[in-house]
Amino acid sequence: MKEEEIRPRKIFDEYLRLAAIDADKYFSGVSRREIPCPACAGKGEYVFSKHGFSYEECPSCRTLFVSPRPSAESFFRYYKESDSAQFFATTFYRETAEARREKLWRPKALMIKEKLKQYGADRHSLVDIGGGYGIFAEEYSRLTGIPVSVIEPGPELADTCRNKGFHVIESFLEKVTEEQLPEGPKAFVSFELFEHLHDAGVFLQHLHSLMHSEDIFIFTTLSGTGVDIQALWENSKSISLQHLNLFNPKSIQILIERASLSLVEVTTPGKLDIDILFNNRSLIKERFWQTLVDQTTESERQKWQDFIAQNGWSSHMSVVCRCP
Ligand SMILES: [Zn+2]
């Protein structure tokens, strides 16, 4: 898989341009609050600023996070009204939907099916938290015939999922009650959501309160210790105003255990780190990676990608946890 296929440069750059303007428009005057490391609650150290947001890194667990952090309300407003959030939800989505369905969502549905089978949860009803346009839900139900519920707070997105025939809970996960969920054993999933959460601890604790002992939760998110993010650092496009927390394989375990859930598995099955570095080689901040991507063939770069992914150093992370 190539970065260009799921994130065409022209469209993505336009989104980033709008996002830079919106960072100023929606957040320049709002009050902000210092927060401790969202994983281990330690004290972070300032590392850089981007688009008017200040990023700290936890010296202990290496979580990278926005602090001081604007209020949750300012983000709600941003997601509801801003040009860049609109652009992402409409133009970006429309232009990339079919490529993403094929390259991302279909393989993801297969991966989730296999993981759930491995952990004895493949007959559980599925709950997709932050289901968006319902593309994963479509692919998963087509593949397995298992009923899928979607938790989605955006009214238009919730409508789209309802029109596709899914059971929709139009709400943030943090407000969902047990009665709204399907009965019986459940497998919860969420994709690329954790990096956006204003308070990941509250999210997990609430999810735990909705889970029973046989339930399972699988999610994917960015890992801040992944190769492309480490090598590009503040030049990384993953460092954008919508991403507030970049956990990593070590720190996500701390977060999960603080929410009294147990970690079953953490992997980094990413495919794009080296391709991202290759496409952004003039922005790399470390000589080693700059030289490496410049002096290797495509098949050599693929070997590096496989090695990085297999050893926990890709920036795309997948986590499985359950109630103890
Ligand atoms: Zn920490």
Image (spheres, helix red, strand yellow):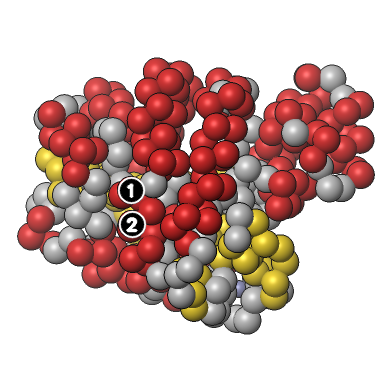
Which residue is rendered at x = 56% and y = 71% of the image? 67
Amino acid type, callout 1 = Glu
Which residue is rendered at x = 63% and y = 65% of the image? 55
Residue that numbered label 1 is attached to: 81
Is the residue under label 2 in contact with that under label 1 (CB below 8 Å)?
yes
Q: Residues within 10 Å of mark 1 (few under 14, many from 20)?
A: few
Q: Is mark 1 within 8 Å of ligand 1?
A: no
Q: Residue 40 location in percent, x, y?
A: 55, 76
Please give left or right for residue 61 compared with residue 320 in the image. right
Amino acid type, callout 2 = Arg
Please give left or right for residue 118 compared with residue 188 in the image. right
Residue that numbered label 2 is attached to: 77
Which residue is rendered at x = 39% and y = 59% of the image? 75
Q: Please, is residue 260 above or below residue 55 in the view?
A: below
State the SS at label 2. Answer: helix
Label annotation for residue 246: none
Which residue is rendered at x = 33% and y = 57% of the image? 77
Q: Please, is residue 219 above or below residue 6 in the view?
A: below
Please give left or right for residue 258 compared with residue 141 in the image. right
Q: Where in the image, quadrant-wise, is ligand 1 located? A: bottom right
Q: Quadrant of residue 83?
A: top left
Q: Quadrant of the N terminus?
A: top right
What's the distance in space between the residues labelled 1 and 2, CA to CA? Answer: 6 Å
Q: Residues within 10 Å of mark 2 (few under 14, many from 20)?
A: few
